[in-house]
Image: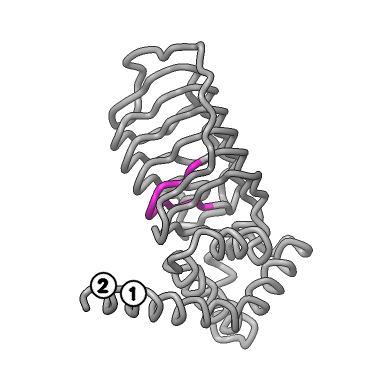
Amino acid sequence: MVYLLVFQLLVFLLICNTTFVALTSLIVFLSYKIKRKYKLGGVDSQNDVIKNKHSSLYLLKRYLGGFMRYYDYRVSQVPSHHFRNFVYRNVYCVDMAPKVVIYYGTEMREPYKIRIGCGSIIGDRAILDGRNGIEIGENVNLSSNVSIWTEQHDHRDSFFRCDTQTKTPVKIGNRVWIGPNALILHSVEIGEGAVVAAGAVVTKSIEPYTIVAGVPAKKIGERNKNLKYEMTGEYVPFY
């Protein structure tokens, strides 16, 4: 009896999220296509917000942006890797190679600027902020609650804007391992085979095969350079 109830609950959760995502995917797909084609991904400056916050276009952008964030949340809760990966590839337009595993609860910002290499694993509740681009290599392991932010506010700016500094994509090399709750900030490059310890805050680029830890992250050791492992794409069902 208990098993039957659990099965019915799983089916109910699957149907709720899957139905919502399926019915609204076209809206999200077209929105991302337009943003990518016309390069509308940038953040409005505070001056523009002050001038235009009552305009119809501004309100439309706000509501559409909020809806897409909600859609992203619903996608991440669907208990099916195949379904989620289909949405990530075909609706979000994420450049995903084969054998990529993305666990539940992952949040993506401007996902069409994200590239993930073969065999890489994105742990549960990760945040991938693709506004300035994210390039993840092959056989990379991002643990639970890893956050990659490619954009941030400028605390020195009078209007606290995001678009006052030049930023470049975050690049993560092959076979990098990033521990739980680590934070990667904009314009950082993490070299092949490097290890980022749990809870570290990475503010500067990391050399290949280097082990870093702390806030801010600093070198504490080196990793074996003869790495040969390859991820198979296996995953925990429903998760």
The answer to the question of whether label 1 and label 2 lie on touching residues, with beta carbons closer than 8 A, is yes
Residue 128 lies in the magenta stretch? yes
Q: CA distance from mark 1 to mark 2?
A: 6 Å
Dot 2 crowding, Cα within 10 Å, few <14, some 14–19, many 20+? few
Quadrant location, the N terminus? bottom left
Residue at the left extreme, as displayed: 2
Of 24 and 8, which appears nearest the observer?
A: 8
Q: Position of residue 110 (x, y in %)?
A: 59, 59
Lateral position of residue 33 relative to residue 175, left or right: right
The colour scheme of the drawn protein is one colour
Q: Which residues are magenta?
A: 121-129
Q: Is residue 168 visible?
A: no
**Residue 3, image x, y percentages:** 26, 72
Residue at 63%, 63% in the rendered image? 92
Q: What residue is drawn where x is 48% and y is 42%? A: 121
The label on residue 148 is: none
Choose top left, top right, bottom left or bottom right for residue 146: top left
- Above or below, 118 against 57 in this view is above
Density class for disc 1 (Cα within 10 Å; few <14, some 14-19, many ≥20) is few
Vertical order, 101 against 82 (above or below): above
Relative to the observer, which residue lies in front, 200 or 75? 75
The circle drawn on residue 7 is 1
Under circle 2, the secondary element is: helix
> Looking at numbered disc 1 in the image, what kind of residue is underneath it?
Phe
On the image, numbered disc 2 is attached to which residue? Answer: 3
What is the quadrant of the C terminus in the image?
bottom left
Residue 106: where, in percent of width, then height? 44, 57
- What's the residue type where badge 2 is placed? Tyr
For residue 113, say whether it is visible. Answer: yes
Q: Horizontally, is 105 left or right of 87 in the view?
A: left
